[in-house]
Image (cartoon, grey):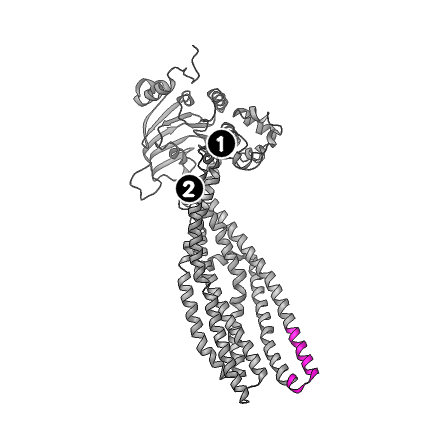
Amino acid sequence: MAELKRIFACLGRYRRDLYLGMFLVLVETSFELVIPVLMADLIDVGVARRDVDYILVKGAQMGVCALLALIGGLFYARCTARAAYGLGANIRSEQFKRVQGYAFENLDRFESSSLVTRMTTDVTVIQNAMIGGVRPLVRSPVMLIMGIGLSIMMNARLALVFIICTPVLGLIMFFVVRSVAPRYPVLQRAVDRLNAVVQEDLTAIRAVKAFVRGEYEEEKFSEVNASLRETSLGTFRRALLNLPSFQLAMYTAVIGIMWFGGNMITRSELLVGELTGFLSYVLQVMNSMMFISNVFLLLTRSLASARRIGLVLDEEPALVSPAEAVTEVADGSVDFEGVSFKYNRSAAEYALSGVSLHIGAGETVGILGGTGSAKTTLVQLIPRLYDATEGSVKVGGLDVRAYDLAALRDAVAMVLQKNVLFSGTIRENLRWGDPEADDETLMAACRRACADEFIERFPKGLDTDLGQGGVNVSGGQKQRLCIARALLKRPKVLIFDDSTSAVDTATEAKIRAGLAELGDVTKIIIAQRISSVIHTDKIVILEDGRIHAVGSHEQLLASDPIYQEIYASQMKGGEPDGTSAQR
């Protein structure tokens, strides 16, 4: 139950709606419980004496009670719905805010499809539990206690039926809940798997169509969909046993009461009105117990969802700003001092081992290395997307762990290997770099990134809609827009993670020329092509997570066999700047 308390702490200002709704349930229940008493008097006094006025008075009283109960129920529904959907909105907001504060290390523990499920399906389960559970949770115990008390007052002997039925209904509820409870977490994990397949298919839909793998994806979806169906059927088949079992017990009790009550009436030990009122209380008590069992099922499922949501809310960010954080980065110098790193502390091998490197402020440094040599891992330590496992990384002469995270990341701009654009216009995407930038500033950054060439060809210019994920522009155009966005940050350190791979060598040369004008900005360029780094101040060659060699193009070409091999394979028949030789 601690998980549910954690979730309901998110109620905030909707707490009063929940409490008001619970009070209205008590009001509704109280009026409903008065009706059987009035009905018994109407039959035993009014009908028996043929007193029309008495019948009309009691009928009017019953009508007023029913109307007041109806009004209470309507206002309850309004208050509870507001509380439930308010709670859902707050939980989603808290989860989203929490995820935004996660480090990459935290995000590695959750699949994106699972996070989506926790923010949607699991929250919906909590909402449904509140909407469907608050009324019976408050109403049923009141109906149960008052119904049993009033029925005993009417006829203690007939009330013995509760002594028999209550343990039977309790056992039914116990076995149903025990059978169903372990299946709800399995059900939610099946939803995770379904979301993962759908998300992957939609993200890679172009590759699916290009390789004509639609049927394969359909089969994969059918498999997880069938798994979810079977899991759902197995879970709810057990849960649905609750209703017929309770109804069997309830109607068996009614038959028993009718039998014994009828005999008591023939012996003049019971009045017809008393039996009618007693039956009303019996039905109310039995229904209350059935509702309580349904509440337990709702709570059981919501508890599974609450645990999953709680894991997201309780996950502590792996990286936080220190208490007295430095908020200004002095310059763009970068130092790696004996840095070793592994993504999982229990891993046997380090992704980076013993890296020591100095990059001066304003320098342009190229990084080369084969696939898996940890080039991206190295630069991710600079803006503190991960913390070094051993050693230290310094920016501006200070350890990155001394900075305020926002200040450090504002001073370091990364153009990612996987270009990311968002739904909206070109202007809206560029303003991620500088929210206050005017059109002239935006276009200046675009000219430096060679993005102005295609933007000016678009009829709407900066107002061109990029579509979801930038689907309306090519790969090379995406890369240039991402470079322009990074330049708008006016960073002290600018990192390019193989971010010109989709542009031609001539355009790349223009971009290099534009970046060369940023003399006070430290530029780190990860590339696969020597032509991308040949003009840098120094080139770092990584091999298996270690620095193999550092030097200028001329120094490495003269002394390093790995660089010589890369140069021979890429530049044979070409000029040093990477353009084709004239023949």
Quadrant showing the C terminus: top left
Amino acid at the residue labelled 2: Phe
The location of residue 494, given as percent across then percent down, is 46, 30
Note whether 193 is above or below 568 in the view shown.
below
**Visible in this render: residue 496?**
yes
Q: Nearest the camera: 299 or 544?
A: 299
Is residue 48 on the magenta stretch?
Answer: yes
Amino acid at the residue labelled 1: Pro
Note whether 474 is above or below 159 in the view shown.
above
Reading the chain from its start, which is encountered first: label 2 or label 1? 2
Please give the name of the residue rendered at 44% of the width and 46% of the height, measured from the top-left corner.
222
- What residue is pinned by disc 2? 104
Mark 2 lies on a secondary structure that is helix
- What residue is pinned by disc 1? 491
The location of residue 281, given as percent across then percent down, is 54, 76
Please give the name of the residue rendered at 58% of the width and 59% of the height, measured from the top-left corner.
81
Q: Which segment is the magenta one?
A: 47-65
Q: Nearest the camera: 269 or 389?
A: 269
Measured in 3D between alpha carbons, the distance from the residue under mark 2 to the one under mark 1, in whole angstroms, is 22 Å
Is residue 314 on the magenta stretch?
Answer: no
Note whether 360 is above or below 307 in the view shown.
above
Quadrant showing the N terminus: bottom left
Q: Residues within 10 Å of mark 2 (few under 14, many from 20)?
A: some
Give the main secondary structure of the magenta stretch.
helix
Q: Residues within 10 Å of mark 1 (few under 14, many from 20)?
A: many
Please give the name of the residue rendered at 69% of the width and 85% of the height, measured from the top-left corner.
51
Is 512 on the left-hand or right-hand side of 558?
right
The location of residue 258, given as percent across then percent down, is 52, 80
Q: Given contact means CB atoms under 8 Å apart, are the residues at marks 2 and 1 in contact?
A: no
